Image (cartoon, rainbow, N blue to C red):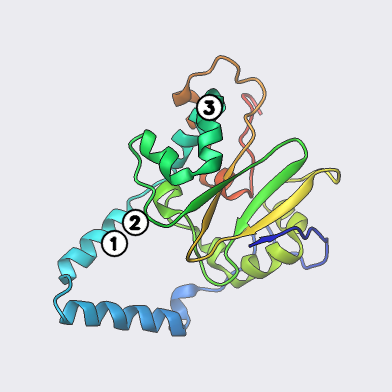
Amino acid sequence: MTHDHDSDRGHDHGPHPYQPDLEAAPLTHYQAMTQAVGELLIEKGVFSADELRAMLEAIDAKSPAAGARMVARAWCDDAFKARLLTDVNKAAEELGIDAGAIPIRAVENTPDVHNVIVCTLCSCYPRLLIGLPPDWYKSRAYRSRTVREPRRVLAEFGTAIPEDVEVRVHDSTADLRYMVLPARPAGTEGWDETALADLVTRDCMIGVSLPKSPGA
């Protein structure tokens, strides 16, 4: 599901969208259901508590490095970029990266279009490629305001998008995740993939920031 809204209505929430202390809030319906299902599966012997803990630790250990490698390769290899834009999961396999079973779609920033990712329902997100979602990504403010007023939200992250550039907001779901393929910064001609990957941050692949040119 893709939203193309870019109005400037809203409120000032400081350097990033305000979100309350998530740990202090009561469990939501879905959090309670998740906990109950996990306990039931352990009780039924589908997996052990140690196996669940090990899987959660493996997910928690993920970083944006895998996604950054893919972006850097796409910047250097037009054929790989075409495959990435067609099927992220298969492109990841080429680099020995496990992107998981849930389909992921890459959306490319161009001189005419800037993309930003949100999950309006919860926090659907390509964790295996870009690590754990930050707290602000899960906040109600970000999830609601990014659809209504993306330019204002981006400005709060310090990302000013020119008025002649279209802002597209992509809504991740349980069945389809998104990642942004940011534009390669000027001044990086001749750089190798390792150096380029160092410029790619988690926030670049969510779309709330841009890779910085050398010396910027």
Which residue was labeled with disc 1?
56
Crowd around label 1: few <14 · some 14–19 · many ≥20 (10 Å): few
Residue 42, image x, y percentages: 18, 77
Q: Is residue 79 left or right of residue 112?
A: left
Q: Do the residues bearing badges 2 and 3 touch, measured as CB atoms within 8 Å?
A: no
SS at mark 3? helix
Q: Residue at x 53, y 27 (%)?
A: 79
Crowd around label 2: few <14 · some 14–19 · many ≥20 (10 Å): few
Residue 65 seen: no
Between marks 2 and 3, how big is the CA–CA gap?
Answer: 32 Å
Which residue was labeled with disc 2?
60
- Vertical relation: 103 (above or below) 175: above
Q: Residue at x 51, y 46 (%)?
A: 202
Identified by mark 1, the residue type is Leu
Identified by mark 2, the residue type is Asp
**Which quarter of the rendering shows the N terminus?**
bottom right
Q: Which mark is residue 96?
A: none
Between marks 1 and 3, how big is the CA–CA gap?
Answer: 35 Å
Marks 2, 3: nearer the viewer: 3
Q: Residue at x 53, y 23 (%)?
A: 76
**Which quarter of the rendering shows the C terminus?**
top right
Identified by mark 3, the residue type is Ala
Q: Do the residues bearing badges 2 and 1 touch, measured as CB atoms within 8 Å?
A: yes
Which residue was labeled with disc 3?
79
SS at mark 1? helix
**Badge 1 or badge 3: first in the primary sequence:** 1
